[in-house]
Each structure stands twice: as structure tokens, then as C-alpha cells.
Amino acid sequence: MNDVDVVSSWRDLMACHATTWCALERELGEKHGLGVSDFEVLDRMAESDHGKYRVQELADAVHLSQSALSRLISRLERSGLVCRNMCAEDRRGVFVQITEAGVERHREALPTHRAVLNASLAGSHR
Amino acid sequence: MNDVDVVSSWRDLMACHATTWCALERELGEKHGLGVSDFEVLDRMAESDHGKYRVQELADAVHLSQSALSRLISRLERSGLVCRNMCAEDRRGVFVQITEAGVERHREALPTHRAVLNASLAGSHR
DNA sequence: ATGCATTCAATGCACAAGCAAATAATTCGT
DNA sequence: ACGAATTATTTGCTTGTGCATTGAATGCAT
């Protein structure tokens, strides 16, 4: 793969990312009062069995810094979608856990999320 | 393509975007004092013949809002990499033009950019 | 020519993100 | 067992981003 190809791959990737991200931000924001990263966090937690996550795990999953995650969780906590629990084994750590309200909100938002992705990624990634 | 596939495509896309973006940000920042969007603007201008761009054109090209672009251009202008010219035909508009220093900086940064992309996108997009 | 709606860019403002430093708890070496 | 190094998270600070608004120029209709 030559330089021209890599560059155009990267540009395509950026374009696709930007379009999809914006569409998600708009739809999730308007219809459910969630940002993309908010949804992503809820989504990870909802799909897991145990429902408990460490902050750093989530940060990796949604590609944010630790500090960004910490604040994001604070916002979600203030909205009652998530709660922090002290972690008994290692008291430096914090377990983040989705609440009933969080599960509910996620269930409401899920179809919107899927719809946007289907619309936005339809052709590009077969 | 079913829901599961779209979602995993989207997650792959986000992961790839995040990794590459961060690598570019770090390398371009450390070695050339440029952010990813800074480079992207210089890159567009350097590859064009006329070298003149309208603000909104650039905003679309680099996937930023018009206001973000306006400020980005101000920063590049302060660094002397770019200059604004009044546009004679339509005096609401502004032409952004790359300077000699801008061309120079872009030339320096280009190999770094290509190297990071090659390293980061090597396998994924054949 | 004047008024009105539209378009281009810049600015005020609020907010989310990253980096670095602070805080808190655990582990390791001796 | 005590202090040093390490790990997990939070907080202070600065910066970049988007939205809404403003200022200015243009096009169009009257």
C-alpha cells in the first residue's frame, strides 16, 4: 500500500467518523439527552453481565482519558444513570454500575443508535 | 448487514480513528508543533494549485465547524503559517492562503504524517 | 433606492477534553 | 514494620470545540 492510498484511507476514515459521530450526537442528544460517549458508556455497561466496570476499563473502551471518564461518570451519576460503588478488594478502585434508570435510558436510545449507524455506515463497510 | 455487524464496524472505526488521531497528535505536536487539524489545513492548502481557500471550504474539508476553523486560522495566522486576504469579488468572504513558512513547515511535517499513517493503518485498510 | 432575507465570517459563551499535580490505597524491599 | 515506589482515581488549569449571535456584504423584490 503506497502513501497516496494510506492518506486517502485516512481521509475516508476521518470523513466517515465525523459524519457518523455528528449524526449520533445530534440524534441521541435531541431524542434522549445523551452524548455519543454517554451512550457508549451505558452501552458497554448494559451489555455486560456483571454490570460492574472499573474507570480505566471504561476509559479504554470509549477511547477517553482517565480524567475525561471520571467527569463523564460524574455527569452520568448526577443524572442518575450510573452509580459509583467502592470496591472492597482494592479500595483505590471504584466500580461504576448502571442503574435501573440507566438501563431504561439505554433501552430507549438503542434503536436510535442502531438506526443512525445503519443509515450512516450502510454502504461503506459491507 | 445486521445490527451486530454495524455496531462492531462502528467500534472498529472509532478505535482505529482514536489510535491514529492520538499518534498523529503526539508525533506532529512533539516534532513540529502542529495539531492534527493544523496539519490537515496546511496539507489541503499545500496540495492545491491556486493555494486559496474559503473558510467554509476548509471547514468542510477538515470536518470542523465554521467557528472552530475561524479560530484555527487565527492561530495559524499568528504563527505565520497562513494569511487571510480580503476577497475582492465578495467582500464578505475571506481567502486563506498558505505562506512560505507554512509550505516549509508542511514539508517538514509530511514525512512524520506519512510514517504514522503507515504504521497505524498498515493492516486494516488494504 | 430602499427594505428584507440570505450568506460569510468572527465572537461571546458554555462545556468537554487532555495534561499534570494532588489524593488515596496498595505493594514491595529491606 | 516502615518508607518508597506503584496503581487508581480525582481535581486544577488551559485549550479547543460547537452553538447561537452579531456584523457586514450581497441578492432580490418592490
Image: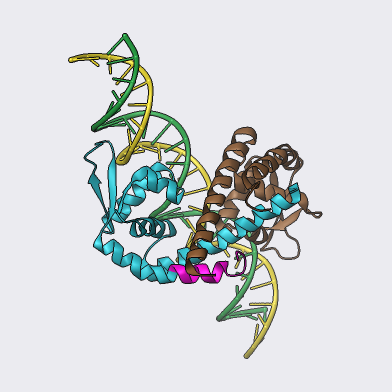
Chain colours: A cyan, B brown, C green, D yellow
Work out whether B20 lies above or below A102.
above
Q: Residue at x 61, y 59 (%)?
A: A15
Residue A80 shown left or right of residue D26 in the figure:
left
Question: Is A115 within the magenta?
Answer: yes
Instruction: Tell me where residue A118 appears, x and y as whole percent.
Output: 52, 70
Q: Residue at x 68, y 44 (%)?
A: B118
Work out whether B79 lies above or below C2.
above
Q: Nearer the viewer, residue D4 or A35?
A: D4
Residue B22 shown left or right of residue B91 in the figure:
left
Q: Nearer the viewer, residue A31 or A101?
A: A101
Q: Most prominent secondary structure in the magenta stretch?
A: helix
Q: What segment is highlighted magenta in the picture?
A: A113-126
The quarter of the picture where residue D26 lies is: bottom right
Task: Answer whether residue B44 is visible to the viewer in this image.
Answer: no
Question: Is B110 within the magenta?
Answer: no
Instruction: Tell me where residue A7 appears, x and y as whole percent.
Output: 70, 51
Residue B32 shown left or right of residue D8 in the figure:
right
Instruction: Tell me where residue B105 appears, x and y as whole percent.
Output: 71, 38
Q: How many marks?
A: 0
Task: Answer whether residue B106 is visible to the viewer in this image.
Answer: yes
Q: Residue at x 59, y 49 (%)?
A: B72
Instruction: Tell me where residue C13 appears, x and y as whole percent.
Output: 41, 55
Work out whether C5 lies above or below A107.
below
Q: Residue at x 35, y 70 (%)?
A: A108
Q: Nearer the viewer, residue B90 or B67?
A: B67
Pick the quarter of the image with the N terminus of chain B. bottom right
Work out whether A5 lies above or below A66.
below
